[in-house]
Amino acid sequence: MHSSKNYYSQVYSAKTFRSKVLLLTVFTCFLLILNGCGREDKTKINEVDNPENVAIAFFNALYNEKNVEKAASVCNPKLARLILHYRSPEAVGRHLFNMSYDNVEVRPDTDGVKVREQFKDNAIITIYLDGYYQENLIKEVKRLALVQKNGKWYIDKILKDPF
Protein backbone atom coordinates (compact mmCIF):
# COMPACT_ATOMS: atom_id res chain seq x y z
CA MET A 1 0.00 0.00 0.00
CA HIS A 2 2.70 2.38 0.90
CA SER A 3 4.34 1.92 -2.45
CA SER A 4 1.19 2.77 -4.45
CA LYS A 5 0.58 5.82 -2.24
CA ASN A 6 4.19 6.85 -2.74
CA TYR A 7 3.78 6.30 -6.51
CA TYR A 8 0.70 8.56 -6.68
CA SER A 9 2.39 11.28 -4.66
CA GLN A 10 5.38 11.12 -7.02
CA VAL A 11 3.10 11.36 -10.08
CA TYR A 12 1.20 14.25 -8.52
CA SER A 13 4.48 15.92 -7.61
CA ALA A 14 5.79 15.47 -11.19
CA LYS A 15 2.58 16.95 -12.65
CA THR A 16 2.78 19.88 -10.25
CA PHE A 17 6.42 20.40 -11.16
CA ARG A 18 5.65 20.32 -14.91
CA SER A 19 2.78 22.77 -14.55
CA LYS A 20 5.01 25.11 -12.53
CA VAL A 21 7.72 24.90 -15.19
CA LEU A 22 5.16 25.56 -17.92
CA LEU A 23 3.74 28.52 -16.02
CA LEU A 24 7.23 29.91 -15.43
CA THR A 25 8.10 29.48 -19.14
CA VAL A 26 4.93 31.26 -20.27
CA PHE A 27 5.54 34.06 -17.76
CA THR A 28 9.17 34.45 -18.92
CA CYS A 29 8.11 34.62 -22.58
CA PHE A 30 5.51 37.24 -21.71
CA LEU A 31 8.12 39.36 -19.91
CA LEU A 32 10.55 39.11 -22.82
CA ILE A 33 7.87 40.19 -25.29
CA LEU A 34 6.77 43.03 -23.04
CA ASN A 35 10.37 44.16 -22.53
CA GLY A 36 11.04 44.09 -26.29
CA CYS A 37 8.00 46.25 -27.05
CA GLY A 38 9.28 49.11 -24.93
CA ARG A 39 12.67 49.35 -26.55
CA GLU A 40 13.45 51.88 -29.22
CA ASP A 41 14.65 50.67 -32.57
CA LYS A 42 18.30 51.71 -32.86
CA THR A 43 18.19 51.47 -36.66
CA LYS A 44 15.51 54.14 -36.95
CA ILE A 45 14.99 57.66 -35.71
CA ASN A 46 12.18 57.26 -33.20
CA GLU A 47 11.46 60.85 -32.21
CA VAL A 48 9.44 62.00 -35.23
CA ASP A 49 6.77 64.21 -33.67
CA ASN A 50 8.74 67.45 -34.05
CA PRO A 51 10.28 68.65 -37.36
CA GLU A 52 13.35 70.22 -35.69
CA ASN A 53 14.14 66.96 -33.88
CA VAL A 54 13.79 65.01 -37.12
CA ALA A 55 16.16 67.36 -38.98
CA ILE A 56 18.75 67.27 -36.19
CA ALA A 57 18.50 63.48 -35.81
CA PHE A 58 18.87 63.08 -39.59
CA PHE A 59 22.20 64.93 -39.70
CA ASN A 60 23.40 63.26 -36.48
CA ALA A 61 22.64 59.82 -37.93
CA LEU A 62 24.45 60.70 -41.14
CA TYR A 63 27.56 62.48 -39.85
CA ASN A 64 28.05 61.42 -36.21
CA GLU A 65 26.61 57.89 -36.14
CA LYS A 66 27.63 57.16 -39.77
CA ASN A 67 24.33 55.30 -40.28
CA VAL A 68 22.74 55.81 -43.71
CA GLU A 69 19.78 53.50 -42.98
CA LYS A 70 18.90 55.45 -39.84
CA ALA A 71 19.08 58.77 -41.71
CA ALA A 72 16.91 57.38 -44.52
CA SER A 73 14.27 56.21 -42.00
CA VAL A 74 12.92 59.79 -41.72
CA CYS A 75 12.88 60.61 -45.43
CA ASN A 76 10.10 60.32 -47.97
CA PRO A 77 10.41 57.14 -50.08
CA LYS A 78 12.03 58.86 -53.08
CA LEU A 79 14.69 60.63 -50.97
CA ALA A 80 15.25 57.49 -48.86
CA ARG A 81 15.95 55.46 -52.02
CA LEU A 82 18.44 58.10 -53.19
CA ILE A 83 20.22 58.17 -49.82
CA LEU A 84 20.37 54.36 -49.62
CA HIS A 85 21.68 54.27 -53.21
CA TYR A 86 24.91 55.98 -52.09
CA ARG A 87 25.38 53.34 -49.35
CA SER A 88 27.89 55.26 -47.24
CA PRO A 89 27.47 58.42 -45.18
CA GLU A 90 30.54 59.90 -46.84
CA ALA A 91 29.02 59.45 -50.31
CA VAL A 92 25.67 60.90 -49.18
CA GLY A 93 27.41 63.93 -47.68
CA ARG A 94 29.58 64.47 -50.72
CA HIS A 95 26.87 64.05 -53.38
CA LEU A 96 23.72 65.39 -51.71
CA PHE A 97 25.10 68.08 -49.42
CA ASN A 98 28.51 68.85 -50.91
CA MET A 99 30.04 68.62 -47.44
CA SER A 100 32.00 66.10 -45.40
CA TYR A 101 32.51 65.88 -41.65
CA ASP A 102 34.42 63.61 -39.31
CA ASN A 103 32.11 64.82 -36.54
CA VAL A 104 29.65 67.66 -36.33
CA GLU A 105 27.47 69.64 -33.96
CA VAL A 106 23.95 70.05 -35.34
CA ARG A 107 21.61 72.78 -34.13
CA PRO A 108 18.49 74.51 -35.41
CA ASP A 109 18.43 78.21 -36.32
CA THR A 110 17.46 80.13 -33.16
CA ASP A 111 19.07 83.55 -33.84
CA GLY A 112 15.97 85.71 -33.73
CA VAL A 113 14.67 84.21 -36.97
CA LYS A 114 11.78 81.80 -36.97
CA VAL A 115 13.18 78.39 -36.15
CA ARG A 116 10.75 76.99 -38.66
CA GLU A 117 8.30 78.18 -41.18
CA GLN A 118 5.41 75.82 -40.55
CA PHE A 119 2.05 75.56 -42.26
CA LYS A 120 -0.10 72.76 -40.88
CA ASP A 121 1.58 69.67 -42.38
CA ASN A 122 4.65 71.34 -43.94
CA ALA A 123 7.74 72.88 -42.36
CA ILE A 124 11.00 74.38 -43.54
CA ILE A 125 13.82 73.89 -41.05
CA THR A 126 17.14 75.71 -41.10
CA ILE A 127 20.01 73.77 -39.53
CA TYR A 128 23.52 74.93 -38.63
CA LEU A 129 26.33 72.41 -38.83
CA ASP A 130 29.67 73.12 -37.14
CA GLY A 131 32.27 70.41 -37.30
CA TYR A 132 35.61 69.13 -38.41
CA TYR A 133 36.81 67.32 -41.48
CA GLN A 134 40.47 66.32 -41.53
CA GLU A 135 41.19 68.83 -38.72
CA ASN A 136 39.62 71.73 -40.65
CA LEU A 137 36.66 73.58 -39.11
CA ILE A 138 33.68 73.63 -41.47
CA LYS A 139 30.51 75.64 -40.87
CA GLU A 140 27.45 75.07 -43.02
CA VAL A 141 23.79 76.02 -43.14
CA LYS A 142 21.23 73.64 -44.64
CA ARG A 143 17.50 73.92 -45.14
CA LEU A 144 15.12 71.00 -45.29
CA ALA A 145 11.46 70.82 -46.27
CA LEU A 146 9.50 68.41 -44.10
CA VAL A 147 6.00 67.02 -44.39
CA GLN A 148 3.81 65.53 -41.71
CA LYS A 149 1.97 62.26 -42.32
CA ASN A 150 -0.05 60.51 -39.62
CA GLY A 151 1.49 62.70 -36.92
CA LYS A 152 5.08 61.90 -37.97
CA TRP A 153 7.47 64.28 -39.73
CA TYR A 154 9.50 63.20 -42.76
CA ILE A 155 12.15 65.01 -44.77
CA ASP A 156 10.64 65.70 -48.17
CA LYS A 157 13.29 67.82 -49.90
CA ILE A 158 16.76 69.16 -49.43
CA LEU A 159 16.45 72.85 -50.29
CA LYS A 160 19.08 74.95 -52.03
CA ASP A 161 21.61 76.67 -49.81
CA PRO A 162 20.10 79.83 -48.33
CA PHE A 163 23.31 81.83 -48.87
Image (cartoon, rainbow, N blue to C red):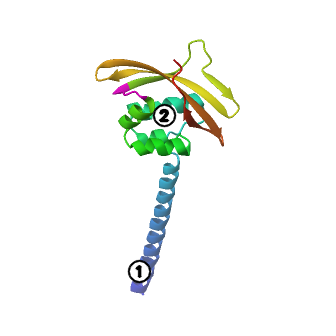
Disc 2 from disc 1: Cα separation = 69 Å
Say which of 18 and 28 sits in front.
28
Graded by Cα atoms within 10 Å as few (under 14), some (14 to 19) or many (20 or more), the crowding at tag 1 reads: few
Circle number at residue 58: 2
Q: Label 2 neighbourhood size at 10 Å, few (<14), some (14-19), many (20+)?
A: many
Say which residue appears at 36% left-offset and 27% top-offset: 101
Residue 44 appears anywhere in the view: no
Question: Relative to residue 22, is residue 1 depicted above or below?
Answer: below
Locate residue 112, reporting x and y percent: 60, 12
Q: Which residue appears farthest toward the bottom when viewing the image?
A: 1
Residue at the location (57% across, 37% down)? 156
How far across and down, in percent of the image, does residue 118 sit? 66, 27
Q: Which residues are magenta?
A: 98-103
> Seen from this angle, which residue lies furthest left?
134
* Rendered location of residue 93, percent (x, y): 40, 32
> Dot 1: what SS?
helix
Three-letter amino acid code at the position of disc 2:
Phe
Q: Which residue is mark 1?
A: 6
Q: Secondary structure at mark 2?
A: helix
